[in-house]
Amino acid sequence: MSLQYVRIACGFTDKITVIIAILSFLAFRIVSRVRWGKQKRDEIFSERKISFCKYFVRDFVIQVHDCRYYFKKSYDSFVPFTNAEQDVHRLINDLLHKGDVFIDVGCNLGMYAIPSAKRVGSDGQVIAIDASPENILMTKKNAGLNGLTNVIALNLAISDSEGESAFYLTEQGTSGTLVKGSKFGQIDHQLIVKTSTLDALVSSLNLEKEIQLIKVDIEGSEVECIRGGRHTLQKTKYLVIECHNMQNKKEIERIVNDSFTLNEIDYKPGLDTFHILCTKK
């Protein structure tokens, strides 16, 4: 089916259309369970990789708050995308103002970059960085979809050295890591990506303003990112970093402790991940 035609014909909003999609998919799961039983249904869904997003025949556009995003039917992260990390979203929104510079390291599909670009306005700038070519392509499309011209999207892996590295993409479709054998999902395939340090990148961009905020979420390589950005941190007011285990968190704290005051935003015990806010002293 295609909900696009339903939305247009009935005049539904994107939110109502998405609710219809969720209900229809749940109904599909229930009918399948009645027909084959739970175990057989789950086996079929797993074998054929049937998920909520793949249930759509066509790609679609969703609206989250006042931003619109392209979504491909192959993506599995649609539901968490619309609900994840609300405390971090609110914090970043509060930290950014008109004219600010925001660097988003690990931008994914632009879930932070797009609303932040609206927040900082045409006098501000958002640098969105991701090692996944697909994520950068979609971030650029999402910036265009929202009429934004202040987003620079760069396909790079940020680390502690310049060169190239293997990048391991997980089967979720929109996530990946430089850390081989990491906990971030089953590896689907890998590719070779260009790496840069944060210092080298910022130098090449010739940013004249102080950096208001850097957000770092790169699935286990956050320590390397910070190590390669010591000069950049000297002209950065805030850092929001996702740490993927206690050791990772302690190492980041050790590096930035002299220059920043640290506060824990949240902790997810099941994933052993922390978000920390670093405020320039």
Image (spheres, grey):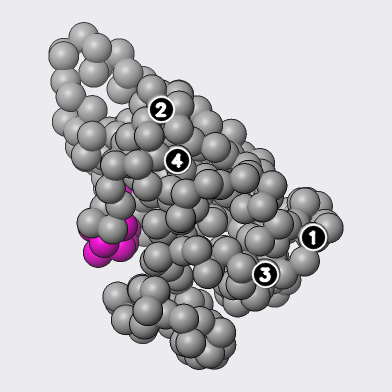
- N-terminal of the two: label 4 or label 3? 4
Q: Residues within 10 Å of mark 4 (few under 14, many from 20)?
A: many
Q: Which residue is mark 4?
A: 125
Q: Is residue 115 left or right of residue 210?
A: left
Marker disc for residue 228? 3
Counting residues from the start of the chain, the first of labels 3 and 1 encountered is 1
Q: Earlier in the sequence, mark 1 or mark 2?
A: 2
Q: Are marks 4 and 1 in contact (CB under 8 Å)?
A: no
Mark 3 and mark 1: span between their CA atoms?
9 Å
- Position of the N terminus, as image quadrant, is top left
The residue that mark 2 highlights is 148
Q: Which mark is residue 162?
A: 1
What is the residue that sits farthest to the front in this orientation? 208
Amino acid type of the residue tagged 1 in the rendering:
Glu
Mark 4 and mark 2 in contact? Answer it, CB < 8 Å: no
Quarter of the image where one finds residue 205: top right
Distance between mark 1 and mark 2 Cα atoms: 30 Å
In the figure, 273 relative to 34: above or below?
Answer: below
Horizontal and vertical percent position of residue 153: 57, 39
What is the span of residues highlighted in magenta in the rendered image? 82-92
Find residue 264 and report its image quarter: bottom left
